[in-house]
Amino acid sequence: MKLEIEHLLKILGSHRALDSLSLTVENTRSFVLLGPSGGGKSTLLRVLAGLEKPDSGSVRINNVSLPDSELGLLLYRRKIGVVFQGFNLFPHLTAFRNITLPLEVVHGLPPAEASEIARQLLVRFQLEKHAHQKPAQLSGGQRQRIAIARAIAPRPNLVLLDEPTSALDPEMTAEVLQMIEELRDDGRDIILVTHELGFARQVADTIALVSQGTIAEIGPPKLIFDGPQSPITQSYLAKTLRY
C-alpha cells in the first residue's frame, strides 16, 4: 500500500479535527494509527473510508486520488472494507445473512455465490455454529468477528478498522486481534486505529501518532516505541505504557 495525504483539513463545528495533516506511507501492508482520544484518528479513518469529505487537502491511495463526487465515493466504498467499534450488524438478520445480503444487494453477486463465500468465511474463522444466530444471541467478540468477515467478504483492496476491540473484554479482544493478524498475514492491506499498543507493535509495518489533528510522529514500530523523537509521542507512550 502507498498512502499520500497532503494538508488534509476537516472542521467539525468549531474544532479542527484534522489540521493540515500530511503523511506519506509506502510499501506498507499494515498501517496503525495511535494517539490520544479526540486527536483525529477516527476522523482520518472516516475520510479514508470515503465517509467524510475533507474541507481541503488531498488523499491518494496506491497513486489514485480519493474521489470528489458522490457517485465516485459510492463506487470507491464498494472496494474497501470498514469495521467500526460498534459492530454495525443488522440486528434482525442472522450472522450468515449479515454477510450474504451486502454481497447480493451492493455487489450484485448471485445468492448461491454469496452463500458460498459466507460459508467459507464462517468456517475459516470458526464461526459456522453461529451462522443462524442473530447479533443479540452472540458475544461481543463473535459480533465483531462477523463484522470483520462481512467487511472482507467482497475481497476489498483495503480494510479499515476503527477501534475494533474497544468494547470487548480481554478474552474477546484476543479473538478479534487474532483474526486481524490473520488478515495481515494473508497479505491484505490494513489501516487500524487502536489503543492496543502491544498488538500495534506486533502487527504494524508503520505506525503514526496522531494528536491535535496532525501527525506527531511516523515510522516503524521499533522507532516509535524504542526511540520516539516527538515530545508528544514520548508523553503519550509514557502515560499509556506506565501500567
Image (spheres, rainbow, N blue to C red):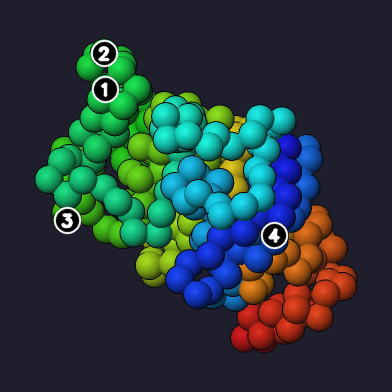
User: What's the distance in space between the residues labelled 4 and 1, CA to CA?
Assistant: 37 Å
User: What's the distance in space between the residues labelled 3 and 1, CA to CA?
Assistant: 23 Å
Q: Earlier in the sequence, mark 2 or mark 3?
A: 2
Image coords of residue 108 (percent x, y)? 30, 18
Of badges 2 and 3, nearer the viewer stands 2
Q: Earlier in the sequence, mark 4 or mark 2?
A: 4
Q: Which residue was labeled with disc 4?
A: 21
Image coords of residue 34 (percent x, y)? 64, 65
As helix, strand or loop, the secondary structure at mark 2 comes to loop
User: What's the distance in space between the residues labelled 2 and 3, CA to CA?
Assistant: 28 Å
Q: Residue at x 87, y 73 (%)?
A: 229
Of badges 4 and 2, nearer the viewer stands 4
Quadrant location, the N terminus: top right
72 left or right of 94 in image: right
Query: Marks 1 and 2: in contact by CB < 8 Å?
Result: yes
Q: Quadrant of residue 111?
A: top left
Residue 136 is marked as 3
- Amino acid type assigned to the residue bearing label 3 in the image: Ala
Q: Which residue was labeled with disc 1?
A: 104
231 left or right of 34 in image: right
Quadrant location, the C terminus: bottom right
As helix, strand or loop, the secondary structure at mark 1 comes to helix
Q: Earlier in the sequence, mark 4 or mark 1?
A: 4
User: What's the distance in space between the residues labelled 4 and 2, CA to CA?
Assistant: 42 Å
Q: Earlier in the sequence, mark 3 or mark 1?
A: 1
Which residue is nearer to you in this view: 33 or 185? Answer: 33
